[in-house]
Image (cartoon, rainbow, N blue to C red):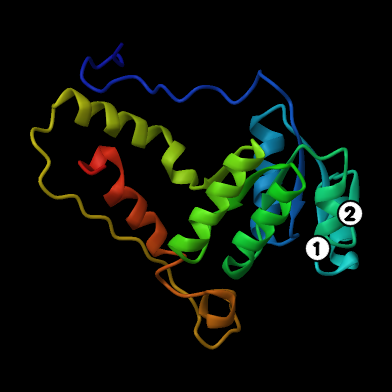
Amino acid sequence: MTTPNGWFPAVRVPLLRGGPVLRWGGARSGTIAGDFVAAVRRNTDQRVTAVASRSIERGRRFAERHAVDRAHTSYEALVADPAVDIVYVAAPHSEHARLGLLAIGAGKHVLIEKPIATSAREAEEVAAAARSAGVFAAEAMWTRYLPQFDVLDQLLQRGDLGTIRLATAEVGWAIDADVPNRLLDPGLAGGVALDMGVYGYWFNSSPSAGHS
């Protein structure tokens, strides 16, 4: 199937409506978590039923702002909530693996913001725990699911661009070094490699880029 111009393939990314409706709980109440909830509400049938934050006041403000049913006083309470089927982890990088394992240990599915962990060992631990518990665990590498990457993948599979011998990706944005920011805090696993660099790592290691 092709688009009207006859060359670019049609996008195969499915609509995000229909199918099982899960009840989501958010681990953290920052900007990224808010963007996630807004996108879920705008584009899917999924429900966001709970949130947990380090501060109950922030959690309650987040719940009110985003029409989330309730705010929990701890992450432990969030993963123990019987009205939560899957946990979305939007904490700083240093907490990704710990909170992912906390959710898995409670028998919850989990979607962890990128990077899924701060080391290969941690990532393997999360994957092994999910397999053992029989739950779903994934890294929220959102660029992987953008329509343009599906079109590029099809072009490469068709061989339209010939043999790809090199693929490069450059990602960056401005950060004010004089303003406190988690991206510049080594204690929160900040830095270019684990935040901006993840996008380039994904692109250059994906099947579309000619690697396994």
The image quadrant of residue 81 is: top right
x, y percent for residue 153: 28, 32
Q: Which amino acid does label 2 sit on?
A: Ala
Answer with left or right where residue 187 lies relative to residue 163: right
Q: Determine the residue positioned at 75% across, 60% down.
A: 29
Answer with left or right where residue 178 lies relative to residue 207: right
Q: Determine the residue positioned at 13% across, 50% down.
A: 166
The image quadrant of residue 171 is: bottom left
Structural distance between the alpha carbons of marks 1 and 2: 8 Å
Say above or below: 133 vs 78: above
Residue topped by disc 2: 71
Q: What residue type is labelled 1?
A: Ser
Q: Determine the residue positioned at 19% across, 50% down.
A: 167
Residue topped by disc 1: 53
Residue 115 seen by the camera: no
x, y percent for residue 143: 44, 45
Q: Which of 189 and 200 is in front in this view?
A: 189
Q: In which quarter of the image is the N terminus?
A: top left
Label 1–label 2 contact, CB within 8 A: yes
Q: What element carries label 2?
A: strand
Q: What element carries label 1?
A: loop
Q: Quadrant of the C terminus?
A: top left
x, y percent for residue 69: 90, 43
First of labels 1, 2 by sequence position: 1
